[in-house]
Each structure stands twice: as structure tokens, then as C-alpha cells.
Image: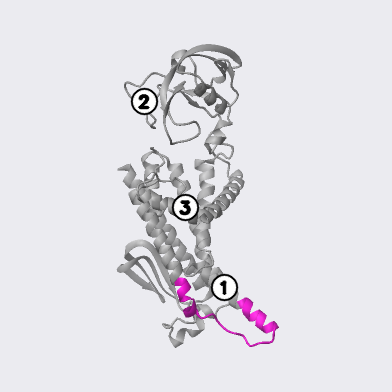
Amino acid sequence: MAYLLGVVLFALAILISVSLHEAGHMVTAKKFGMKVTRYFVGFGPTIWSFRRGETEYGLKAIPLGGFCKIVGMTPQDDDVSPADESRVMWRFPVWKRTVVMSAGSVTHFGLAIVALWLAAVFMGLPNPDFPATEEQARQEPAVVAVTDCVVVEYVARACEAGDPASPAAQAGLRDGDRILAVSGTPVDTWGDMLQAIRGADPGPATVRYERDGTTGTVEAELAAVQRPELGTDEGPLSTVAALGVGLRIEKPGMVTYGPIEAFGATGDYLRQMAVGTVEAMMRIPEKIPALWASITGAERDIDTPISVVGASRLGGEAVANDAWELFVLLFISLNFFVGVFNLLPLLPLDGGHIAIAWFEKARSWLYAVLGRPDPGRVDYFKLMPVTYAVLLIGGAFTLLTITADVVNPITLFSR
């Protein structure tokens, strides 16, 4: 039930974001005097609507987005009445059209920034010093958290009846102990400890540790477990030794900030997202084969793109596991990504319309410098093949990601 609630809540959050995106276009267009005739949430048959002034507002049956109709977005629009000729969008200065067309992405950025600041103050943001990868974790001091048992098979689950007791617990090690050596092999980092344990045979081992500034030694009976090669998550399994401990990191994973400090933390996180978003978009072409492979039976790569379906499923997982911070960070990341993606200079994206507007202005300036007649506006009809190609590629990619998210979804809380 909690999972379903999370899916619905995240889908609703996406719908609200898209509706506010369109509201950004509408509000700025009206502010400049452009005529906006329709603003709807959803697509398809109209469920409910009302008219206020010259604009019809309403709700449609398919809650997969929204739209607003600004009269005369291009010179080729043929539904402009003579009375509206002076208010068509394409006649307005290029900077005003840029503001209107970018207002949707600015709204997404605004949502992300506000949500980030609130998260920084009330929930916390990921600690920048916290090890985010396994390689970073290996560089942490070998301070342990003692488990209750060891799971012999290679699965991620809690302890069950019949699982061998933790050798560390039986030997008397405690949470917070720092391992200094295993059977005479010096240990400094968590990676060193893993290597030392794997290098030992299951059975008796001498473990030297430090606790509250005092060193001590215990005899532990290392358990025999099945694991892949160290540093990998897949591949052939072999029998190796295990101490029954996890890495204990003293630095918290989430850090809260005061209202003023939160601005700096928000800026830092935004910069990280900007870099990550650009890198993710650049990797999209190389991830397509992996997406296809995941549909045909291969393991789903956690780094492959997801659709709104996949994002909603992750939102459901977050709520089901009481990980609301993940829910919020997913919402923030999605808004930021959509804001950036929508500004790409490709039709029919808003960035495509902005690019054309500035191309027209630059071309008019150049022709004036050369003493040649102004060539006028770009003919959108001539750009239709490119637009259709973008729609076809985008539609195919969306279908691919949705299929992968249904057939072989990414999951963060089980393996």
C-alpha cells in the first residue's frame, strides 16, 4: 500500500511540475500582452473547464502533462483572427519571446532550488564528504559495525534463522572498533581490511583492534561465505572468509544546514546536478544498447535512463522504505533535468523556438550590416522534417525507457 501511495504521489508531483511549467509560459505571455486562449492540465477529452477573460482554463482526461495556447507562436500559424494580429507572439521583441519560452524551464529550476533549500534546512542534503561509491568507501578508516550474522549466499537480505552468527560478535568486537590487523596483516583502511579477510582462510584468525584509544586482540572464527571477486557485483562465486562486519562511517550521510548556510549548500548541490545532468545527457546514446539488453533479459544497469514510469516506481520504493529524502531528491533531480533538457535548441522543445528567434535576430543584423534586405522570419514549414525526426527519435527513446521500466525496472532497495 505504501509503495502504491508513493507511485501516485510522485506521479502527482510530476503532473504539478508540468502544470506549473505551462503556467510559467502563460503568466509571462499575458504579462507582455500576448493573447493566451487556453490553459489545460492533461490531454484528451475535456472533463471540466471555465472561462475567465479571454482564456479558457480546464482539466482533461489524460493526466500526462498540460499545455497553454499562445496565439501566433510562429508566422505560419493560420488560426489568428485579424483582431489579434497585433498580439501574436512572433511579432513581439525577441527578448520577450525568450522570456516566455524559457519560463517553463525557469519554473522547473525554481521548484528545484526551493525544494533544495527546504531540504537543506529541514531534511538534509547528501554529505559531500560521504563516500558515494565503493571505491571511496574503501578509503575510509576500517571502523566496523558488527552484524548479527553472516549471510552465506550472495544475496542482500536481513538475518534469518539458521544463518551463522557473526564471528566478530562472538569474538567480542563492538560497533566503532577500528581494525588494525588481521592475522598479522596490517590494516589501515576498509579496503585493506577486506583484502586481509579475503586473503585469510575461513577458520581461526587473530584480529587486533583499537577501542577508545586502547588496543586489544581477539580470536575470531572466520565464516565461509560465497562471494564474487572483490570489487565486483557479479561473476563467478567462490568460498571466502567473512568477519561479519560492515563499514561504520562516522560522518552522517545527510547533513542539515541553517537557513543562511542552506543557500551555499543549495548552490553546491545545484552545481553537482548541472555537471551530472550534462554528463548523463552525453551518455544517453551509449546507454541505448544497455536499455535494449535489459528488455531482452540482461540485468538492468542502474546508470541507464529512466522514464516518468521508472521515476514514479522509484518514488514508490522510497515511500515504501520510509526514505522520504530519496523521494524529495528524485523530485529535485527530475525537475532540474527537465529544465535543462527543455532548453536544448531542438524543435519542438522550447529551446528550439528560442534558438530560432535569436537566429532570426542575428541574421537580420547581419543583412543590415551587409546592406541587404531583411530576409524576414524563418519558415517553420521548412523545418518540419527536422521536427518530425526529433519527435520520432524522442518517441522511440521514450517508448524504450518505459518498456524497460515496466519489464525490468531499476530498484534501489533490493538485489
Find numbered disc 1 in the image and state the secondary structure of the residue it sits on. helix
Q: Nearer the viewer, mark 1 or mark 2?
A: 2
Q: Amino acid at mark 3?
A: Lys
- Mark 1 and mark 3 residues within 8 Å of each other at the beta carbon: no
Find numbered disc 3 in the image and state the secondary structure of the residue it sits on. helix
Residue at the image position 52 percent from the left and 56 percent from the top: 281
Magenta span includes 52: no
Where residue 55 appears, as percent x and y from the top left, is 41, 74
Majority secondary structure in the magenta region: helix
Find numbered disc 2 in the image and state the secondary structure of the residue it sits on. loop
Q: Which residue is mark 3?
A: 287
Instruction: Determine the image quadrant of residue 192.
Output: top right
Which residues lie in the magenta part? 361-387
Q: Earlier in the sequence, mark 1 or mark 2?
A: 1
Q: Which residue is mark 2?
A: 159
Alpha-carbon span between mark 1 and mark 3? 38 Å
Q: How is the image coloured?
A: one colour
Alpha-carbon span between mark 1 and mark 2? 62 Å
